Amino acid sequence: MTTTETIDELQQSRVAAIDNSGWGRSFAFYQPRNAAFWVYLLLVASGILTFFAMLATSSGAYGRAIAVAAISFTVYGAVFWWFTRHIDRYARQPVKLIVVAFLWGGFAATWVMAATANDALLALYAKVFGQAWSLDWGAGLAAPFTEEVAKGIGLLLLVSLAPRLVRTAFDGFILGAFLGLGFQIIEDIVYALNSAGSQFGANQVEAAMSTVWLRMATGVTAHVLYSAIFCAGLVYLMGRPGEPRRAGRGLALMACAMLLHGVWDSAGAITRGNGALMLLMIVAMILVGLYVVVRVFKMTVPREREYLRHVMAPEVANGVITDAELEAMCGDRKARRAFRKAPATHHERKRAGFVLEAAGDLADELAGSRGTDTGRVEFARSEVRRIRAVVPSANP
């Protein structure tokens, strides 16, 4: 086989990877001929109106608490937003689609769906099992089902709105995290508002901040984590063009997310109000939750790395990047760190990191052009070569 034939095959594999992953495609939210667009718009708009109407009725009495909670959770949410975007380093989802996911989680999944379903289910539990039992166990046996399903319906709508973008379980993992982030931020603001009235509003800011700090401390294993796991499982259950259907794995992940959620909401009933046991259980649940979400990340990300490998393989054949750089790009965090630390001098190590960043920009441009050598692609290639050609400083 000639070199030309090899490069042609690599180019074909690149185009197939770009098409299968949906990498580089844009997202148009306005789709008047798509029923999913109108369902989304109606439910999110209803949730927004409900939420802000509630704030308007409470702003006169608890305006300061609302402002403090909103600012605090906005900053907190921004940190989660940055981290989730940071780990989405492969076939990245458009920001517009991320915002659409966040808004569904924050307003439709909460106020229109989960809140109504929770109230109805808790009322049924109270009638069937008694008020005391419902107070102890109702939340843990209602929220995991109603809330995870409500966020999962959001992912189904996103698949209908952006079928060429939601292609793999990793896409479900990332979008699920943003669905959960929206849910968590709005829910936490309401919890803080409820706390503000605990002393008839006398110390509303202090009372609200106690809830803010508690929700921040435990939020690392809350809705963001649950819905990331649940939605990854939902994609496995459905199957997508870029992800073969694995119903057993999908159902297991969805059940795992609901189990984690249910145990968390039932912690008080399980520990019978024992403070020390409650603290121990919270720490254990945080550790277990983090372990599970890391395992799910490692389970879903290899397909994304394989797509990246196919997209960048022709650049190795053309001499734009090296085999070692491709392995670092497609490897895990440990592989990238090892690549950056391999050079002898500090300057060369920094340059190695910059080369990887430039190569990542090149991959984005190639995906956006579907492998065509556009002006933006050629510029990105020239940046990789320019950074590599920089002469090391004599005094790093």
Image: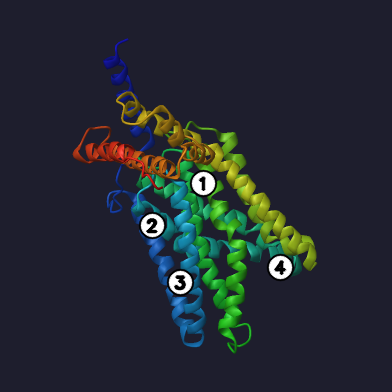
Q: Position of residue 95 (x, y in %)?
A: 35, 53
**Residue under label 4:** 135
Please name the amino acid that badge 2 sits on: Val
Q: Secondary structure at mark 2?
A: helix
Cβ atoms under marks 1 and 2 closer than 8 Å: no
Instruction: Give the foreground label among 1 and 2.
Output: 2
> If you read the primary sequence from the N terminus, does the residue marked by circle 1 or circle 2 appear first?
2
Instruction: Give the foreground label among 3 and 1.
Output: 1
Q: Is residue 372 left or right of residue 325?
A: left
Neighbourhood count class around disc 1 (C-alpha, 10 Å): few under 14, some 14–19, many 20 upward: many
> If you read the primary sequence from the N terminus, does the residue marked by circle 2 or circle 4 appear first?
2
C-alpha separation, residue under disc 3 versus residue under disc 1: 25 Å
Q: Is residue 294 visible?
A: yes
C-alpha separation, residue under disc 1 versus residue under disc 4: 29 Å
Q: Is residue 54 above or below residue 291?
A: below
> If you read the primary sequence from the N terminus, does the residue marked by circle 3 or circle 4 appear first?
3
Neighbourhood count class around disc 4 (C-alpha, 10 Å): few under 14, some 14–19, many 20 upward: some
C-alpha separation, residue under disc 2 versus residue under disc 4: 35 Å
**Residue under label 1:** 231
**Residue under label 2:** 99
Please name the amino acid that badge 1 sits on: Cys
Q: Position of residue 148 (x, y in %)?
A: 56, 53
